[in-house]
Image: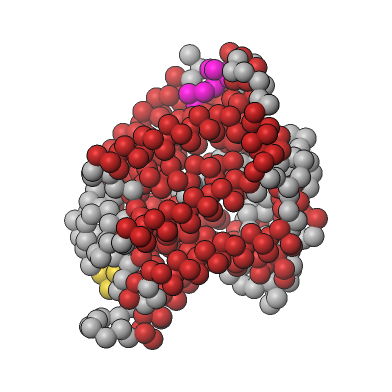
Amino acid sequence: MVLFVPILSLVALAGTLIYLAAAPGTRTVVRAFAIAGSMWYAAPILLRPLADMLDVGELVSAKVFAEFATLETASLATTLLIAGALLRRPRFSQLHLAASEDLVGVWPTLAVGCLATIAHRLAASLVYGPSYLEQNAYPLSVGPGTEGGILGVLAFGESLLTAWGIAMLVIPRTPKPSSTQKSVLWSWIVARSLADFLAGSRIALFTPLAVLLLAPRRRWYAKAILLIAGGVLIPTAIVLVPVMGELRQRGPIQLSSVVGAAKEQPSPGTETSRIFLGQVLAKFDSFSTGAVLVSASGLGQAGWTPYEGAALALLPRLLLPNKPSPGSGDGSPAGHPSRVVARILGYNSMAGNMGVSPGAITLWQLGWAGLVLLVAANVIHVVVVYTLLLSRSAAVNAIGLQLIAVPAFHTLFATPDVILMSLQRTAALVLTVTAIRRLANTPGHRHSGLRTRRTWGT
């Protein structure tokens, strides 16, 4: 059986998650990796036989798929094994800041977050264009510029505020948010999820479910809500995923057009199942696209060029107009592996964008030796995320959750250049929060800034 080794690697990955869970305070991290592992690793491996049966049209042979699936899964399992060994050390410390509510307050932050969500959507529609294809094509059709940079900062700020909202719901803290605050937080997250879905992001539909999966479920009604949400969202996705795949190719998406197209869907059958499975694998099977990248471009072709852009990511383009795009093999947006694979597969040369597995990208960058850097960088990443989520500060928790990237979780295990860029931003944000805390000098707090403290419970 060709998939025996990939399935065995999935079992090993599950074992490393259990090992990591034994370290104190790793609940949120383990749940995040469990969700990511289910989507990006288990789903494509376990669905491959069904895809062969329904003749979905695979990009690579079963043998090549199995090789890359095993490579990627083994890389993640090795990372979690090493990270688990580090986090089980009894004297491991964490960052600690005064609670973010002491600095700003829940309601003002909520208000800013909601306004940022509206402002980002309006600005993106005006600058990039209202349709999914226009927004995907913008970096290539216009190129890097001031407008794109400003929108990037706005998007980053909005995602950070959203991560703060998720942190308030999934990480236990004292004092707890009130029932009214939780209701507003959930309303904001659901509304943002719907807005992203109507903008063409199919995975955004699962944001509420991802938050519920990350949240503590100590009481029966929390488990009941999770089951109800899953029971509603999963069948809804089965109907809407193929619909959205078609609608976002035509132009701006309206809720009425989604509902109308869903009603016109044919009755469940072999053809419907084939279309749905093809859409799911097109999204989550990054093993096959990774194999396409490596086979078409070769090992070590990109070299260190993707890291130049990542190292300079925080430097404003106004100061360095010709700085390379992060992750790109030639310094331009078109040289990013997601764009390269899309062109190889014959998709729209301007708007095409394919997810590619981190192990394959690292092979494309640095060859086989790059896998050592991949594991080392991600071990550091796991430890940083763990440390940030263990803090009692909602602001610091938000920085950690932004690194997780709910609901796609695609940056949880990422290429070294992405982690380099993420860690720079994290350091800048933590220093900013520390500086604000020092300037605020809230009465009643005898400490300010960073210190180490051991607290369990996440």
Left or right relative to 432: residue 60: right
Rendered residue at 68%/77% (across/down): 319
The residue segment tinted magenta is 45-52
Queried whether the magenta region covers residue 240, the answer comes back as no
| Residue found 60% across the figure and 58% down from its top | 307
Q: For the point 41% across and 81% down, which residue is it?
A: 435
Count of numbered badges drawn on the protein = 0
- Left or right? Give the position of 383 relative to 200: left
| Residue 70 seen | no
Q: Is residue 308 above or below residue 209?
A: below
Q: Is residue 47 magenta?
A: yes
Residue 65: percent from left, percent from top: 57, 26
Residue in view at x 67 percent, y 62 percent: 122
Magenta segment main secondary structure: helix
**What is the x, y in percent for residue 197?**
60, 45
Give the side of residue 295 with respect to residue 281, left or right. Answer: right
User: Residue 181's spot in the image, x, y percent?
Assistant: 37, 61
Nearer to us in this view, 306 or 423: 423
Provide residue 135's location: percent of width, then percent of height: 72, 53
Q: Based on the displayed image, in which of its 4 quarters is residue 276 positioned?
A: top right
Query: Which of the two residues, 397 or 3, is positioned nearer the viewer here?
Result: 397
Closer to the camera in the image, 380 or 402? 402
Residue 246 shows in the view: yes
| Vertical comparison of 325 with 255: above or below | below
Residue 182 is drawn in which quadrant?
A: bottom left
Colouring mode (rainbow / by chain / secondary structure / one colour): secondary structure
